[in-house]
Image (cartoon, helix red, strand yellow):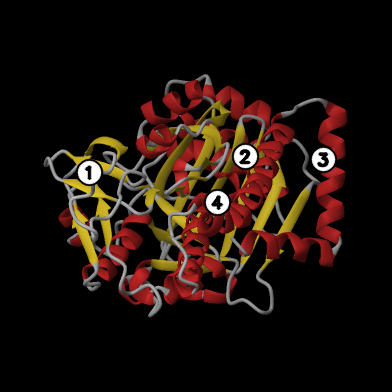
Amino acid sequence: MQGSSKVTSHLRLALVESQDLERARIWNLPPDQFSNRASSLTPSSLSFLSQIGAWPYVDTSRVQPYRHMRVWDGLSSTSRISFDALTSEPSIASMTENQNLSRALIARLDNLSAVSLFDKTSVADICLGPPPSSPPKSPTTPNLSSYPHVTLSSNRTIAARLLVGADGLNSPVRSFAGITTRGWDYDRHGVVATMKLPAGTGHSSENPQGVTAYQRFLPSGPIAFLALPGNYVTLVWTTTPAQAMKLKALSTEDFVAMVNAAFRLDMVDLNFMFTLDSGQVGELEWRESVQPSNRVQVDGETPQRIASVQEGSIASFPLRLRHASTYTSNRIALIGDAAHTIHPLAGQGLNMGLADSRSLASAVEDAVLHGADIGNEMGCLDNYKGEMWMSNNRMLGTVDKLHWLYSAQLGPVVGLRGLGLNIVDALGPLKGWFMRQAGAM
């Protein structure tokens, strides 16, 4: 970020990473294979990646924009909402693998002379600098007692005017700063996989403007598939830990049958199929023969049928909500998962992290432009916290409430949420407002 702005290009930046960045630099998959960890990038995120000079390094042949999204309630055949890209935007969002983006960001960093990369390196300790000697060794000796000093596993110590914690859910930087978090575990797992559509039905190759993402809200959590290039889609299925374990234990053929069933069958049928240890393929065929799947449609569309799953791509991870009580303290700033962790149902996790980065970079640039200390909590860092904490809190709260709302199975609740969904779908300006809020991340 510093290298993309003339104002901050003189600042020295150190990136400490425990993983081997060389593996990310040389990451490469053939065109018929995709990583199971993919993310949805909003137009705002794409703009930021272009602004900092990272987007030219992205392999765009592995990026798939989508212009339409169809969402419906698994407990109500009439409750649905359709989103289409705003006329001012080329797409709702674009899907790409996380590793494609990581490789591009590292390539950009490699071309910035002011950035030092310390990979295969962990943080051994973080502490404040020693008090200044009295008298000082020389008039020019800086007082670094308020600076965080980061000791690396290589025994090197770095004094940071501003220490940015982009170090995940269990952030050591956040712990050092004494910043607390609130939140809870959802008792849900996200099952991910890379899946393939039947030959000849490739969404991107035949109709680039008609690429559609599908999401169905089941009581255990939403199931969604989003387009990847060619005939491929990425699956994210939120379900209980027990059902996630069952899905991962199935044969690939039975797993595919369960995914197709989750988009087509009533809940009583799907729940029965979860009781089977095998044979889901035949069970789905029989149930569809007596209950035609064309009754499950969204705006006249039936979700595309999945043909196969990429070998070794099925995995799962626990879902949580966490939010830091603040994003800053003196000479400390938190971004990304160190600051917040969100349910994946809205696909906003990575976009929120990129928005954090954009806001913090802007605050640092403004501080440098006005001759201020970039580590001063009352100036530079307050600007960042003021812009992002409440915005992220609203997004976290909205997504959390959607999770609990669609987990409810009581008849009156199902009816009311269906009515609300249909009202929003019918009110174009209100639906457009929701689209703009999501796309601004």
Residue linked to disc 3: 417
Query: Neighbour class for label 1 at 10 Å: few (<14), some, many (≥20)?
Result: few
* Chain-order first, disc 4 or disc 3: 4
Between 26 and 63, the one nearer to me in the picture: 26
Foreground: disc 3 or disc 1: 1
Measuring 54% from the left and 35% from the top, which residue is drawn there? Answer: 322
Secondary structure of residue under mark 1: loop
Residue linked to disc 1: 18
Foreground: disc 2 or disc 3: 3
Query: Neighbour class for label 4 at 10 Å: few (<14), some, many (≥20)?
Result: some
Measuring 41% from the left and 67% from the top, which residue is drawn there? Answer: 63
Q: Quadrant of residue 30?
A: bottom left
* Chain-order first, disc 4 or disc 1: 1
- Give the residue type that dot 1 points to: Ser
Q: Is residue 86 visible?
A: yes
Q: Looking at the picture, does residue 113 appear above or below residue 225?
A: below
Q: Which mark is residue 51?
A: none
Residue linked to disc 2: 289
Foreground: disc 4 or disc 3: 4
Q: What quarter of the picture does the N terminus occupy?
A: bottom left
What whole-number distance in Å separates the C-alpha atoms at marks 3 and 1?
45 Å
* Chain-order first, disc 3 or disc 1: 1
Q: Which mark is residue 347?
A: 4
Foreground: disc 1 or disc 2: 1
Q: Looking at the picture, does residue 123 appear above or below residue 247?
A: below
- Give the residue type that dot 2 points to: Ser
Secondary structure of residue under mark 3: helix
